[in-house]
Amino acid sequence: MRITQVTVGVQRIINLGNYENARYECTQTAEVEEGEDPAEVYNQLRDICRANISQEVERLQPQKTRNK
């Protein structure tokens, strides 16, 4: 079997208190080039998604503090 494409999805739900949540989701897809390791492509995409979600969560922190 030859893997030609990898898709990774990461999501995170943050409790804002007062019965409110913020949901962040990131999905990335990449073509696996000849000679590339699909597991490494997966890891790279996962890291991209995690970094993107972490940035959004950091932006949320001042707002979360104000809601308390």
Image (cartoon, rainbow, N blue to C red):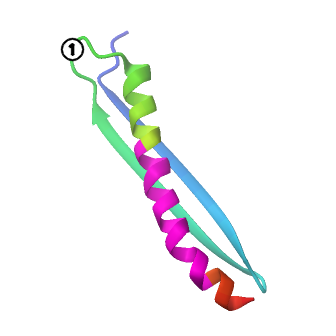
Q: Residue at x 52, y 58 (%)?
A: 54
Determine whether the residue tagged by mark 1 lies in a helix, strand or loop: loop
Q: Say if the magenta span includes residue 51.
A: yes
Where is residue 26 drawn, in percent x and y?
Answer: 45, 55
Within 10 Å of disc 1 (Cα), the crowding (few <14, some 14-19, many 20+) is: few
Q: Quadrant of residue 43?
A: top left
Q: Quadrant of the C terminus?
A: bottom right
Between 29 and 54, the one nearer to me in the picture: 54
Q: Is residue 17 above or below residue 50?
A: below
Q: Is residue 37 left or right of residue 21?
A: left
Kind of residue sitting beneath label 1: Glu
Q: How many marks?
A: 1
The residue that label 1 is drawn on is 34
Pick out the residue farthest to the right. 18
Q: Is residue 24 above or below residue 68?
A: above
Q: Residue at x 40, y 45 (%)?
A: 48
Q: Is residue 43 left or right of residue 15?
A: left
Q: Which residues are magenta?
A: 48-63
Q: Residue at x 65, y 64 (%)?
A: 13
Q: Say if the magenta span includes residue 6.
A: no
Q: Quadrant of the N terminus?
A: top left
Where is residue 36 drawn, in percent x and y?
Answer: 29, 16
Q: Is residue 57 left or right of residue 65?
A: left
Q: Residue at x 37, y 27 (%)?
A: 41
What is the magenta segment's predominant secondary structure?
A: helix
Between 4 and 44, the one nearer to me in the picture: 44
Between 55 and 28, the one nearer to me in the picture: 55
Where is residue 60 drawn, in percent x and y?
Answer: 55, 75
Where is residue 45 drawn, in percent x and y?
Answer: 40, 38
